[in-house]
Image (spheres, helix red, strand yellow):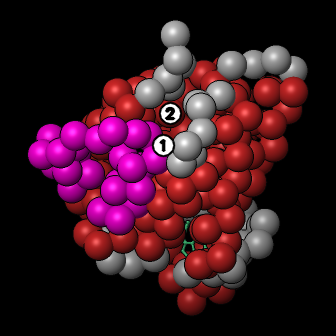
Amino acid sequence: MSMGVDDFANWMRDAAGVLHENAAYLTELDAAIGDADHGSNMDRGFAAVVAVLDESSFESVDELMKKAGMTLVSKVGGASGPLYGTFFLRFGAALAGAEITPATVGEALKAGVGGILARGKAELGDKTMYDAWAPALEAYDSAVAGGADVGGALTAAAEAAAKGRDATTPLVARKGRASYLGERSAGHQDPGATSTTLLLESAARTLA
Ligand code: ADP
Ligand code: MG
Ligand code: MG
């Protein structure tokens, strides 16, 4: 059975639920090294994506994901809206006209993360969401090379993201608001790496 619009819509709905449940937690993480709005930003953004899904129907996965990206860019201020918005815009664009396979989803993930880097200029170890995305991409590709399907590769990606998220705790932030704290940002888990892990766990559950 091939994956399609309904599966990706389920991902967005599941992600919205999980981000809503974790909004207080994400905001608490952001209170320690930022401005205490990451949970409300993500919750508001994904609630808007769900509202769009409820109102519209989509012919293709790329259309759906591009619309999700545009919605996040327009509804979420701060760093995370444009970063996640660009991720989904490029993720969708990469899937235009493509069949959904482990390889094409991998290419789309890479394109999306390329968008995060183009916008945010983060490097590995800067204590950002990229510290979760980078190991996730690697794990995804090795799982596919080992014969995994999309769900299996996303499960591997989510596990790697969780390790990357945990590894942000001792780091000193070099990008975003947390970098204003300098050394005082060490000892706190990055909020964006945490939401990235939640998004990938949600993808692994829904795109299996
Ligand atoms: P803001 O910092 O504008 O309030 P959020 O609190 O919603 O936005 O998001 C903060 C998260 O965004 C951080 O935890 C970090 O993971 C991510 N982030 C911030 N700046 C960058 C960047 N330049 N590149 C990648 N991720 C970033
Ligand atoms: Mg914030
Ligand atoms: Mg903010």
The main secondary structure of the magenta stretch is helix
**How many angstroms separate mark 2 from mark 1 (CA)?**
6 Å
Q: Are marks 2 and 1 in contact (CB under 8 Å)?
A: yes
Which quadrant would the C terminus be assigned to in this image?
top right
Dot label at residue 178 = none
Give the labeled residue for mark 2. Answer: 203
Type of residue at label 2?
Ala
Which residue is pictured at 61% across the width and 78% down the height?
120
**Above or below — where is 77 with respect to 14?**
below
**Above or below — where is 115 with respect to 108?**
below
Residue that lies at the very extreme toward the top in this rendered image: 1
The verdict on residue 149 being magenta is: no
State which quadrant residue 178 falls in.
bottom right
Q: Nearer the viewer, residue 126 or 4?
A: 4
Q: Is residue 92 left or right of residue 69?
A: right
Which residue is pictured at 60% across the width and 68% down the height?
116
Which residue is pictured at 87% across the width and 20% down the height?
146
Give the labeled residue for mark 1. Answer: 199
State which quadrant residue 104 falls in.
top right
Residue 106 can be seen, yes or no: yes
